[in-house]
Amino acid sequence: MKRLFTSLLAALFAVPLLSFSPYPAAHGVLLEESSLGLRGVPSHDVLGRIIIVPETEFSASEANEMIRTLARIDRTILEQAADHHIYIQLLTGPITDEPTARHLRGKTPRGYMPGSKTWDDVPGIGGSHLVLVRLGHSEKGKGHGSVNLELHEFAHSLDYIVFDRIHETDEFQAIWREEAPRLFPGEYYFLTYPEEYFAESFAYYYASDKTRQTLRAAAPRTYALIRGLAERAS
């Protein structure tokens, strides 16, 4: 009887933990438990805990490309993401097939004319504990306008969850107003939404040496802020 009571008590305390955890909303396999090799990938131990790969057949080369791109992010930031229970789910199909994005089916994303595009066509979404990105859609023009899909969407979740909505701070708002027109002249999306400017600047910083240099030359204050995030996260 005592054993039964103990089991019931444990179950009662386990249910809320499952309810508030972001992971049950996803399906797939944690990278560290998958068959993908991580040898030689920086921060592979942290990435293994936050990246979810499909349970079904998928392109290992496309997955490895995304993983190696995310591995360019400073380890301290990745550790903070893990500590805040942020996961990145790699998908083979539309994001609106997933439970957390199903409510967006048929809806037009902001920044698009009604009827021109729906969330069903968008290959990624971030800002919550579960980032969704579609394999094979990393590059600009593959259903999105970012220099890199996975970095941009992951940055939204870092912004809102790890860095306490940094895009809303007076410091960032001043930088955005000054430097967004220089980095993204005439680009309505980044000039209108500071959170999009943050996410894309983050993507520029980590996507490649070339994009990082572009960021540094056109938006030095933004560059310094993004560079300082690793120290802030430590």
Image (spheres, helix red, strand yellow):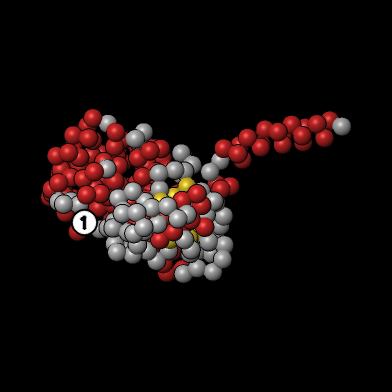
**In screen coordinates, is 89 left or right of 207?**
right
Residue in the picture at 26% in, 41% down: 194
Q: Residues within 10 Å of mark 1 (few under 14, many from 20)?
A: some
Indicate the position of residue 91 as horizontal and vertical percent values: 48, 60
The structure residue drawn at horizontal position 18% and vertical position 34%, both measured from the top left corner, is 174
Q: Name which residue type carries label 1.
A: Thr
From where the camera sits, is residue 82 visible? no
The image shows residue 101, relative to residue 175, as above or below, that is below
Residue at the (27%, 31%) spot, across then down: 169
Residue 155: image location, x then y, percent: 34, 46
Disc 1 secondary structure class = helix
Q: Nearer the viewer, residue 49 or 163?
A: 163
Where, by quadrant of the figure, is residue 72 drawn? bottom left
User: Which quarter of the rendering shows the C terminus?
Assistant: top left
Q: Residue furthest front?
A: 115
Of 188 and 179, which appears nearest the observer?
188
Instruction: Name the residue that disc number 1 marks.
Output: 211
User: Percent position (x, y) of residue 134?
Assistant: 43, 61
